[in-house]
């Protein structure tokens, strides 16, 4: 279904069902904007956490540690690579969360203008409000996916870091 079909369908449904009031349209626009702001806030937090992960990798995994690990028994090497692998998975999860962009940005305003300029205002309000309502629902699903990737990032990073810290303290008696 194309955007114009969606707008037409929504306008018939919403404008006919409701007496579209300005307050309803304003609330739909507010909620739509809020979903975009929430996504931006999540992206910012994930970016900060990724920066922390890279700094932690730089501090925790150094040349001395690598030399000691590769001179150690196979179990120590396995624990190190599992911890490091989990940290790499956390980085990819964070990157996927940031770049997960399936957001809907509302109706095409040029199309709305040409289609509803000569019709009653309620039709345009209904079309815009209905499309923004649909897009807000879709955007909330996209935000939930971002949050899921962020949770995977935090969990895998935490487990990987704990494994490397235990390895450094337990096997080598040093911590950075």
Image: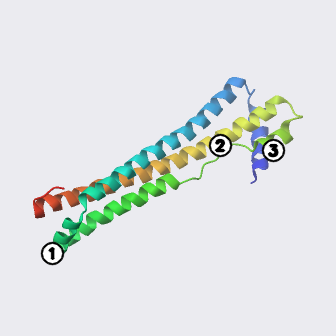
Whole-percent x, y for residue 6 in the image: 75, 47
Q: Which quadrant does the C terminus fall into?
A: bottom left
Whole-percent x, y for residue 103 in the image: 60, 49
Residue at image x 74%, y 32%? 17
Of discs 1 and 2, which sits in the foreground? 1
Q: Is residue 27 left or right of residue 126?
A: left
How far apart marks 1 and 3 lie (CA) works out to: 67 Å
Disc 3: which residue: 111
Disc 2: which residue: 134
Among numbered discs 1 and 2, the one appearing first in the sequence: 1
Of discs 1 and 3, which sits in the foreground? 1
Q: Is residue 57 left or right of residue 51?
A: left
Whole-percent x, y for residue 100 in the image: 53, 54
Residue at image x 81%, y 44%? 111
Q: Is residue 64 above or below residue 36?
A: below
Disc 1: which residue: 71
Packing grade of label 2 (10 A; few <14, some 14-19, many >=20) is some
Q: Is residue 168 left or right of residue 15?
A: left
Packing grade of label 1 (10 A; few <14, some 14-19, many >=20) is few
Q: Is residue 3 left or right of residue 105?
A: right
How far apart marks 3 and 2 lie (CA) works out to: 17 Å
Of discs 3 and 2, which sits in the foreground? 3
């Amino acid at each position: 279904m194309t955007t114009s079909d969606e707008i037409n369908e929504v306008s018939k449904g919403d404008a006919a069902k409701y007496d579209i009031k300005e307050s309803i349209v304003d609330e739909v626009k507010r909620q739509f904007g809020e979903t975009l702001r929430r996504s931006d806030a999540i992206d910012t937090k994930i970016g900060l956490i990724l920066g922390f992960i890279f700094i932690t990798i730089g501090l925790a995994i150094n040349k001395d540690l690598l030399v000691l690990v590769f001179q150690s028994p196979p179990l120590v090497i396995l624990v190190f690579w599992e911890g490091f692998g989990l940290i790499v998975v956390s980085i990819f999860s964070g990157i996927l969360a940031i770049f997960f962009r399936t957001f809907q940005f509302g109706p095409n305003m040029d199309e709305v203008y040409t289609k509803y300029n000569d019709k009653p205002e309620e039709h345009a309000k209904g079309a815009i409000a209905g499309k923004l309502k649909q897009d807000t629902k879709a955007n909330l699903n996209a935000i939930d996916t971002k949050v899921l990737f962020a949770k995977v990032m935090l969990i895998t990073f935490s487990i990987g870091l704990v494994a490397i810290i235990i390895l450094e303290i337990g096997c080598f008696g040093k911590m950075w």
